[in-house]
Every structure is written in C-alpha cells, then in structure tokens.
C-alpha cells in the first residue's frame, strides 16, 4: 500500500469482536512480507460468508476453536477483525495442524449444502504471492461507516552508520539461533524423484532486522548491508561451531563473504567441523564479492579446496551469465536464478561445471517451468525458495 487507503462501507450482522488495530497490524504484516520476501501462509475465516444460521456467537466460537491447532504453527499470529472474521498467519508448513483445523471446520459445516468447498469461508493465502488478493478480501471485513482510512505503515528507514553500529552491538548480546534458518537443495534421482542433496544454513536478515532494529531496511545501502553480512557471517559460524550443532547434520552449504574465510571465527568453525562433514560442505559466494576483489577470490578458492570444501557462485542472474568468465572462475558449482527469460538464452549456460537451478516456488507455474528447464538441460540440482 502507498499513501492512504480508503475502504468502502461493508455492513454485516456479525458480532463486533475485533478492533481497527488488529486489521492495521495484519496489513503491516502483509506489507512486511512483500518488502522482505519472507513467505507466510494465512487463513481467513470470513464471517460474512458463513451460513446465516451460523453467524451467532456460539457458532462462531466453535469455528474459531476449530482453528486452534494453527496457533501452534511456526510464528503463528491471530487477528480478530471487526466484522467477526479471524485471520491466522504462520511460517513454513503447517502440515497436520492445518489438516486438523480444516477437517473440524468441514464437520461443523457438513450439513449445509450451500458450502461446497471449505475455501468459500476459509480461503488460504500464500504471502507475498497472494498479497493483493488478501488485501481485497480484508477490505470487505470492515463494517464501519461511511468509510475508514487506513494509514500505511511508515516507509522503513535506511540503515545508516549509527543504526548499523546499534544493530551490531545488539548482535553481540542476542542468541542468534532464533534467527537461524535452513533451506533444502534437492537432487533429481535417476527415477526422477527428488532426494535431499544438502541444506543451506543462514540467518534471516529480514526477521533479525525486524526484531532488533524495527522499521529499518537493512538492504537499502549496499555497502552498509555488506558490512552487516560480514557480522552475520561471524555470528553464524560461532553458532555452528557449538559442539552439539552439527553432530547429526548432513551435507550443508553456507552463504559467506570471501573475507570471512580468513577470520578467526572461520578457522574455529573449521577445526570444530565433524569428520563426517569434511568434504560435504559448500562455500557459497556472491558474484559481486568476487568481482570486487578477484585476487582475494582466487586465494579463498584455494584455501577452501585445501580443506576439501567446494566453492559455489550463487545467485547468478541472466545478465551475469554475459559478464562472468566461468572457466576462469573455476568454481565447483554455479547457482543459476531461473526466470522465463533464461529459456531464451540457453547458449549462455556454463559448461563443464555442475549447475544448481534456483527458483521461487510461490507459483506452481514457475515451479513447473523450472523443473522442465532443468530436465531439458541436464540440471540435476534444484533449489526452490520460499
């Protein structure tokens, strides 16, 4: 949203269970998903779409109780809206929790022939993909007259040297394990099924910034953001060097800056790495970091290989396929960012190196196109992003 959003009148007979702060908070969460790209799921139990004989406090309470399992999903939040509707958001897969909630709702409405699909009253949304659709649905939940004005959340401030210093001081004191995330990279087996290849470990910058330095955009200034990532590298390595952290871990990869490989934190991590992971670790480097100091890259590549690590150049977009000399870079793996435009420039695909195809799995259409592209060009490693 930008500026002021004007919401037209919507008048419903449902009980007034929520307040304006709730929907404003929900709009803020949607906007934050759009800014950060951090995916969330949402379910909206829409009171006005319930059968008339069920829009009563007793029935709504039963419907709300059906949603209770979702409160146990990762980072779940509940929003009671002014027309009696309720929204619940969460991160990741809710799995059996979502199944239990929807099954209970179906039983509650089983005798009503007008409800052919539970999605009629409790649609599911994936953010940020469905942000506009969900905003539109929320507009109809506001039963005030003649109209209300929602003020957009303030534009995040840029990260400046003072706020960066404050954030770095906070990082020295906070337990960063709460921001640790992993993303699976998959291998296409001979039978065409996907099997785990390795886990990418990282700290969520979006969630960390939102918690420790609210209303700031950590990526707005690329130079300050790069310094921040170096600090995060060190904190991630210190976390992973803990004796229990990687004891049962399988193959993994780390997004790091080139300079991080020569820090005491990396050397400590290297000495603490369990024997079964020696030879099963990828160091993932950004092209911008490589281009900024090619000599440091060559040294870091040799340093990593001497310790039996593999080097991957990550987030290679179509323009970078034109700019980089992959033969000279001599990396072990190249992570390509899939876009429909890539299908028109297959002659640019690096040869003689293992390729990983990265793509957003918010859209089933993109997911399918990426899988087909990978199969057509012999790419056996897939990295879907949430």
Image: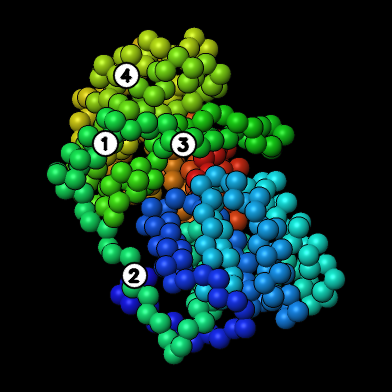
Q: Which residue is mark 3?
A: 181
Residue that carries the numbered disc 2 in the rendered image: 152
Where's the N terminus, which quadrant?
A: bottom left
Kindly give the residue lying farthest to the left in the view shown. 162
**Residue at image coords 82%, 74%:** 112
Q: Marks 2/3: CA distance?
A: 29 Å
Mark 3 near mark 1, Cβ–Cβ under 8 Å? no
Per the model, the C-alpha gap separating discs 4 and 2 is 43 Å
Percent coordinates x, y for residue 199 in the rendering: 51, 30
- The nearer-to-camera label among 3 and 1 is 1
Query: How many numbered badges does the structure rendering display?
Result: 4
- Neighbours of disc 4 within 10 Å: few (<14), some (14-19), many (20+): some
User: Disc 3 or 1, which lies upstream in sequence?
Assistant: 1
Nearer the observer, 97 or 378: 97
Disc marking residue 170: 1
Secondary structure state at the residue bearing disc 1: helix
Contact (CB < 8 A) between labels 4 and 2?
Answer: no
Q: Nearer the viewer, residue 217 or 16?
A: 16
Q: Which residue is mark 4?
A: 266
Disc 3 is placed on an element classified as: strand
Label 3 CA crowd tier, 10 Å (few <14, some 14–19, many 20+)? few
Labels 3 and 4: the sequence-earlier one: 3
Please name which of the two marks, 4 or 2, marks the residue nearer to the observer.
2
**In the rendered structure, which disc, 4 or 2, sits on the residue that comes first in sequence?**
2
Q: CA distance from mark 1 to mark 4?
A: 21 Å
Pick whichever, 66 or 37, lies toward us: 66
Q: Position of residue 40 (x, y in %)?
A: 51, 53
Residue 72: assigned label: none
The quarter holding residue 195 reads top right
Gap between marks 1 and 2 measured at Cα: 28 Å
In percent of width and height, residue 310 lies at 42, 22
């Amino acid at each position: 949203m930008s500026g002021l959003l004007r919401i037209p009148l919507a008048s419903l007979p449902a009980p007034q269970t929520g307040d304006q702060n709730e929907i404003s908070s929900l709009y803020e969460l949607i906007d934050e998903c759009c800014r950060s790209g951090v995916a969330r799921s949402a379910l909206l139990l829409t009171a006005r779409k319930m059968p008339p004989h069920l829009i009563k406090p007793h029935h709504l309470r039963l419907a709300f109780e059906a949603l209770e399992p979702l409160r146990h999903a990762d980072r779940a939040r509940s929003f009671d809206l002014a027309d009696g509707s309720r929204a619940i958001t969460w991160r990741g897969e809710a799995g059996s929790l979502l199944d239990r909630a929807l099954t209970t709702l179906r039983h509650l409405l089983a005798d009503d022939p007008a409800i052919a699909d539970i999605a009629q009253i409790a649609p599911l949304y994936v953010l940020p993909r469905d942000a506009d659709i969900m905003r539109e649905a929320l507009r109809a939940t506001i039963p005030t007259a003649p109209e209300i004005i929602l003020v957009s959340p303030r534009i995040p401030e840029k990260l400046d040297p003072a706020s960066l210093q404050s954030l770095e001081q906070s990082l020295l004191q906070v337990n960063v394990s709460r921001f640790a995330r992993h993303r699976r990279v998959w291998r296409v087996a001979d039978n065409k099924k996907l099997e785990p290849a390795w886990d990418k470990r990282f700290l969520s910058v979006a969630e960390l910034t939102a918690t420790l330095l609210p209303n700031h955009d950590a990526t707005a200034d690329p130079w300050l953001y790069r310094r921040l990532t170096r600090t995060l590298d060190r904190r991630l390595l210190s976390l992973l060097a803990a004796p229990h952290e990687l004891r049962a871990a399988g193959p993994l990869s780390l997004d790091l800056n080139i300079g991080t490989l020569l820090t005491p934190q990396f050397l400590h991590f290297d000495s603490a790495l369990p024997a079964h992971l020696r030879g099963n670790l990828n160091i993932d480097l950004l092209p911008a970091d490589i281009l900024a100091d090619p000599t440091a890259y060559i040294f870091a590549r040799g340093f990593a290989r001497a310790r039996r690590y593999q080097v991957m150049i990550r987030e290679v977009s179509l323009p970078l396929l034109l700019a980089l000399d992959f033969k000279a870079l001599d990396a072990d793996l190249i992570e390509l960012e899939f876009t429909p435009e890539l299908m028109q420039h297959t002659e640019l695909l690096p040869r003689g190196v293992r390729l990983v195809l990265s793509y957003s799995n918010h859209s089933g259409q993109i997911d399918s196109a990426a899988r087909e592209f990978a199969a057509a060009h012999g790419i056996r490693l897939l990295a879907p992003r949430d």
